[in-house]
Amino acid sequence: MKFKGTGVALVTPFDTTGNVDEQGLRNLVRLQIDGGTDFLVVQGTTGETATLTKEEKAQVLAIVLDENKGELPVVLGVGGNNTAEVVQLVKHWNTSKVDGYLSVSPYYNKPSQEGIFQHFSAIAAVSEKPIIVYNVPGRTGSNMSAATTLRLAELENIVAVKEASGNLEQVMEIIQQAPDGFGILSGDDALTLPMIALGAHGVISVVANAFPEKFSQMINASLTLDIIKAREIHYDLLKVTHQFFAEGNPSGVKAALKVREICNDVLRLPLVNVSEGLFEAIKSETKRLVG
């Protein structure tokens, strides 16, 4: 299972005219490679994918692949609440371009557990690449239960789950009963250390966009059971982690990326910039963390 350690859910930088900022995206990918990130996730929620056109999605992926040049595995976000449409996207995708897919549990429809299972089973049946399923009840309106995740784990090309339920008892049930080789990845930055302590294999992080150096150090320390070092970095990052989500994601992390001069903090509606007060707080923490 190649998707372990520190994964980052890349933001999509925009320029001041609202178009995709190619140089900003290249800066971000290079920051991840140099900062110790283990794999890249393109067009997840943090990438404001819901506001990208089909052409922009292709453009963003092409830029990431070109700048990455095969250095890190690349996972592409392909999800939705229309199963047939997602199946067609996966079925006709040029699989040579990516190493796997991240697919979110269907949102808005609020399907039953059997509906969630059948949705992912249909995608898995046509995918030539491994799939990470994504459980994030706060965005989808429904929780994918541990039992459903464990059923999906038996399918050959569903290789991991990104768990963002915030329910550590559910996480423990999955870890305890998952088949060998099935990955459990944190979808909550603040809960990553405790999840790895329980047996998870890594994270798909928002915070690592801005601080890949420190975040990857924390993950590596966690996975090698250096709990003292991991805990020290965890608490060092905890304040800025809370700040990043205080007024919406990726508004917070884009503010920090602006401070680091990686890209600016332009967002697309319905997302807006963080308030002036929060920006100053993020600026202060960012400067402290990067020196």
Image: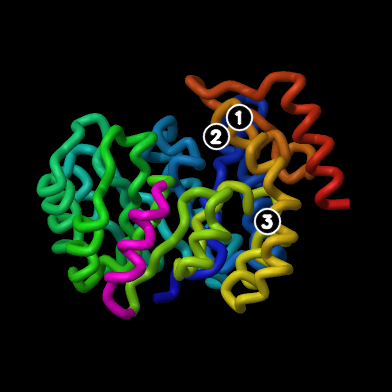
Residue, x 31% and y 69% (percent of image)?
A: 159
Q: Position of residue 194 (x, y in %)?
A: 54, 59
Q: Identify residue type, mark 1.
A: Ala
- Say which residue label 1 marks: 246
Q: Quadrant of residue 171?
A: bottom left
User: How far, Cα to Cα, is label 3 from label 1?
Assistant: 18 Å
- Residue count near mark 1 (Cα–Cα under 10 Å), binned few <14, some 14–19, many ≥20: few
Q: Identify residue type, mark 2.
A: Asn
Q: Nearer the viewer, mark 3 or mark 1?
A: 3
Q: Position of residue 196 (x, y in %)?
A: 51, 66
Residue range corresponding to the magenta coloring: 167-180
Residue, x 31% and y 36% (percent of image)?
A: 140
User: How far, Cα to Cα, is label 2 from label 1?
Assistant: 8 Å
Q: Is residue 65 visible?
A: no
Colour scheme: rainbow
Q: Identify residue type, mark 3.
A: His
- Say which residue label 2 marks: 249
User: How far, Cα to Cα, is label 3 from label 2?
Assistant: 20 Å
The relative height of residue 41 versus residue 200 in the rendered view (above or below) is above
Q: Toward the viewer: 138 or 146? A: 146
- In the rendered structure, which disc, 3 or 1, sits on the residue that comes first in sequence? 3
Q: Nearer the viewer, mark 2 or mark 1?
A: 1
Q: Is residue 206 left or right of residue 179?
A: right
Q: Toward the viewer: 127 or 221? A: 221
Residue, x 31% and y 56% (percent of image)?
A: 133
- Say which residue label 3 marks: 234
